[in-house]
Amino acid sequence: MRIAQIAPLFESVPPRLYGGTERVVSYLTEELVRQGHRVTLFASGDSVTSAELVSCSPEALRLDPAIRDPNPHYMVMLDRVRERANEFDILHFHIDYFHFPIFRPMAARTLTTLHGRLDIPDLQPLHRAIDNMPLVSISDAQRAPLATANFVATIHHGVPIDLYRPTLDPRGGYLAFLGRICPEKRPDLAIKIARTCGIPLKIAAKIDKADEHYFHDVIAPLLDGADVEYVGEIDERTKGAFLGDAAALLFPIDWPEPFGLVVIEAMACGTPVLAFRCGSVPEIVEPGATGVVVDTVDEAVNAVPRVIALNRRDVRRRFEERFSASRMAGDYIGVYHSLFTKGIYRELDGQRIVLPVRSGLVRVPKVQEHPLGAFSPEVVPSANMRKEDDHGERNAPA
């Protein structure tokens, strides 16, 4: 297929340091290219990809101190996507809802993965007014506040199998906290849990400008002993060792986490996870297999020995079974395939076309001057993809 991936401009793809959405877009893009699809990535000019790169800003917006308003840069991006839209079978957006009004007339050829929280009341009128854009949630919990929106699938994130090596015999002797320093991620609770257990804690985290006061007022005063170390923001090369050497990852969140990429990154390293029951956590962490899910600090403190004792080889195995980039790409290909074929069936120069189906593979015949572009590869929908039928009923995984 000819696929456009439209990424946020705040970070490069992949990001140099922190940036969950851009990292997932990179994993998906590279896996689609590896599987033989023709992919074009619309992103910042400092992105690195094996796909065709269309630069929509010279560098990641976060890195340019002169940037005060990101919206004009997104308007430039959307105009470039619009100009080339007919070159693609599918336009896959990862930029929230910026593109909805412009691309609504061609909604059947678009897919939007929503990466953020959806419990914001302002989103309700938007999705009622523009209700034909196909959406993907990254967890079932994420979509709950917008249950009537046009979701076509829930697709969990995935990480390349060979990106991290499992550490089966960690020697670090510490608990890890990785992510952002902000109130909803609760690094203060991570410190409390670690200190109560008498185990050192290492914090590797980004501090956004909006959270600088929180860091200085709440977190910095807690960094008053050798048992808690703030190591700053780390890159991809350092992350594997940081997570792999940890006895466990602490994930004491206090918000409706849409997914939590760091959780499966830890699993990829064989590191078990102790997480609070919020948002997507019960979908991602398997109690007794990849971690423990708790509700309170006291429960967390009591659970730490059990988490550390989990078999790290099993943690890694479950990561490979559930959260690989190839599984994620397969799920998305299944959705692309469904949207594309439904779009052709409904209209092709005003005529309905019946698509022949053989052995579960949909083969689309070549059509001259196809308004949606040529669909060349034969795509097998992933058995693991949890999609919904036309009546909104959830189909059980095969």
Image (cartoon, rainbow, N blue to C red):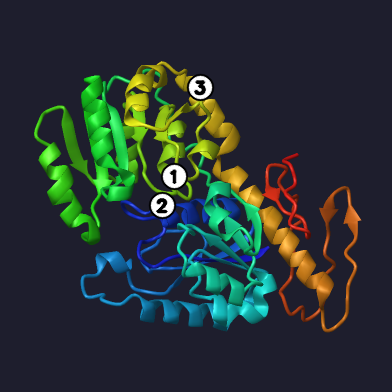
User: Which is closer to the viewer, label 2 or label 3?
Assistant: 3
- Residue holding disc 3: 288
**Front-lying residue, 66 or 283:** 283
Q: Quadrant of the N terminus?
A: bottom right
Check disc 2 and give the amino acid type.
Answer: Gly
Q: Secondary structure at mark 1?
A: helix
- Residue holding disc 1: 261
| Left or right of 377, for residue 244 | left
Tell me how far mark 2 sits from mark 3, CA to CA. Answer: 26 Å
Q: Find residue 364 and report its horizontal and vertical position in percent.
A: 82, 64
Tell me how far mark 2 sits from mark 1, CA to CA. Answer: 7 Å
How packed mark 2 is, by other alpha carbons closer than 10 Å (few <14, some 14-19, many 20 or more), is some
Check disc 1 and give the amino acid type.
Answer: Leu
Q: Find residue 9 and report its horizontal and vertical position in percent.
A: 39, 68
User: Which is closer to the viewer, label 1 or label 3?
Assistant: 3
Tell me, yes or no, whether the two marked residues, 2 and 1, touch with CB atoms within 8 Å. Answer: yes
Asked whether residue 332 is in view, the answer is: no
Q: Residue at x 35, y 65 (%)?
A: 10
Q: Quadrant of the C terminus?
A: top right
**Front-lying residue, 256 or 289:** 256
Q: Secondary structure at mark 2?
A: helix
- Residue holding disc 2: 20
Tell me, yes or no, whether the two marked residues, 2 and 3, touch with CB atoms within 8 Å. Answer: no
Q: Residue at x 41, y 59 (%)?
A: 13
Tell me how far mark 1 sits from mark 3, CA to CA. Answer: 20 Å
Q: Residue at x 70, y 54 (%)?
A: 334
Tell me, yes or no, whether the two marked residues, 1 and 3, touch with CB atoms within 8 Å. Answer: no
Check disc 3 and give the amino acid type.
Answer: Gly
